[in-house]
Amino acid sequence: MLLAHKGFSVDVFEKAPTIGGRSAEVVLDDYRFDLGPTFLMMKFVLDELFSNVDRSLSDYLDCRPLDPMYRLQFPAKSMLVHSDPDKMHAEIERCFPGEGAGLRRFLKREEVRFRKLYPCLQHAYGSVTDFLSPALLAAAPHIAVGRSLYDVLSGYFKAEELRLAFTFQSKYLGMTPWDCPGLFAMIPYTEHAHGIYHVMGGLNRIPAAFAKVAQEEGARIHTSCAVARVLVKNGNTTGVELENGEQLAFDEVVINADFGHAMSTLFKHEALGKYKAASLRERDYSCSTFMLYLGLDRAYPDIEHHMIVFAEDYRKCLNDIAQHKIVSEDLSIYVRNAAPLDPGCAPQGHSAIYILAPAPNNTSGIDWEQHKAAYRDRILDILQERTPYGDLRPHIQRELIITPSDWEKKMSVFLGATFNMGHGWNQMLYLRPHNKFEMFGNTYLVGGGTHPGSGLPTIFESARISSNLICDKYGVPHPASRAFDEIALT
């Protein structure tokens, strides 16, 4: 979209029948679901992207703010989470008397961190000297070196459940709160400061909107058209070879396939060095997810759009997944009930329920064909025992299960790590695969496997960074990255 608007001749090759990748749509007869992301945070990034192509986001997408944003279901209590600070303060005091003041401190201090760190998401880190960039130097005192996300939030709240209420967002990166770097406190902050949105029709409408604008600007999108390999000559990419054997020449190649999958399949005959398949497996990767998409013959009008059900022992549950790589009986579960707000996703009086449970990635060696029935039943048991949904089984009309194995084998996600390469200190900024790919000339990366990392807003920023780098190479002007104050407050 960005490059086509700037006058570049753009071809997109998508191996699936429809675009979207992990943000595509799942259709089960009359029931419609998002395949992957369901939370839209930092909507101002989308607004800015559409502004960059002289469009208004509202002409392409209907984004609805959620209030409450979600319900948190703990073993002994339940809490609604609001972006309105007064409502949230009251809810904290209701559930955790005397803790409300921590919210005020959190919002005040984390606003400073967010404003300092946000510019670091807007620029490439393709050189060691980029560590000396003014934005990063200004952010340095705020990156909480040596402190985890849980450590940071423990400075605001005493109650364990309240700390978890502001740290479970580490799951958006496929990490535990105890392993996630403290700088990612910007994630719960942006939820509370800027809200969470639902896109009518599902978040899959976002890539569809990008595609529509791209085509309006002259881009050509080829679906059911898989790339077999990227062509390389003298250290530069020269084009792509399609699965049908056709070779096509291009001046620049942008890769938005899953990074590990791309490295292990699209450059088979090239000297990939540190990105060879064997070396890739030695890196740190996020967890995976076990997915249930259920079309039900009843509605749940009084249950919130988003609900997170915490495991009885949340830390043990996440450690089982991330460290021990085992199937745990004690699960944490996320549920989206979209139909009350977005009735187009299911027939009248029915529901399209999306369920996600974090699971070990495929370094676990788990045989998911053997375990998936029991995992599915355990999820449904927990929802029956601990949520207003009750027993969903009698109401299931359509069902799809996606296991970590399916993510790898059917969706081309390396090791089934749905949140991509991990986000530890050793895999961020310059230490993450570069937007202008360091292994080959004329090659650029976008997506969760490059800087700035996983999560829709940061993935969108990776696209803007890479497109700006291409513009710079050809002397094509592009809008300068705007300061956070200019973006979020407009």
Image: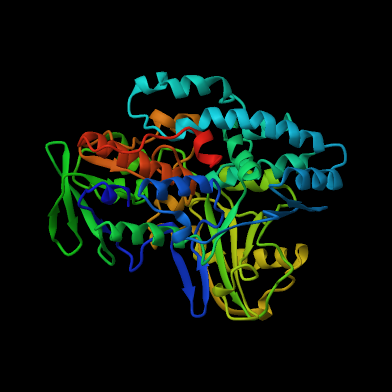
* Image coordinates for residue 4, horizontal then vertical, percent: 26, 51
Instruction: Report the number of numbered marks.
Output: 0
Q: Quadrant of residue 327?
A: bottom right
Q: Which scheme is used to colour this image of the protein?
A: rainbow
Q: Residue at x 85, y 43 (%)?
A: 93
Q: Position of residue 210 (x, y in %)?
A: 38, 57
Residue at image location 35% in from the left, 62% down from the top: 212
Question: Is 387 placed left or right of 98 in the picture?
Answer: left
Say whether residue 324 is visible.
Answer: no
- Expressed as whole percent of the image width and height from the top left, the position of residue 99 reads 82, 37
In the depicted view, which residue is nearer to us: 368 or 59? 59
Residue at 32 percent of width and 44 percent of height: 277
* Quarter assignment of residue 271: top left
Q: Is residue 241 above or below residue 177?
A: below
Q: Give above or below for 247 relative to 353.
A: above
Instruction: Residue 439 in the image: state x and y as whole percent.
Output: 25, 35
Q: Nearer the viewer, residue 14 or 265?
A: 14
Front residue of this view, candidates 22 and 378: 22
Residue 49 visible in the current orientation: yes
- The image quarter containing residue 349 is bottom right
Q: Relative to residue 113, is residue 103 drawn left or right?
A: right
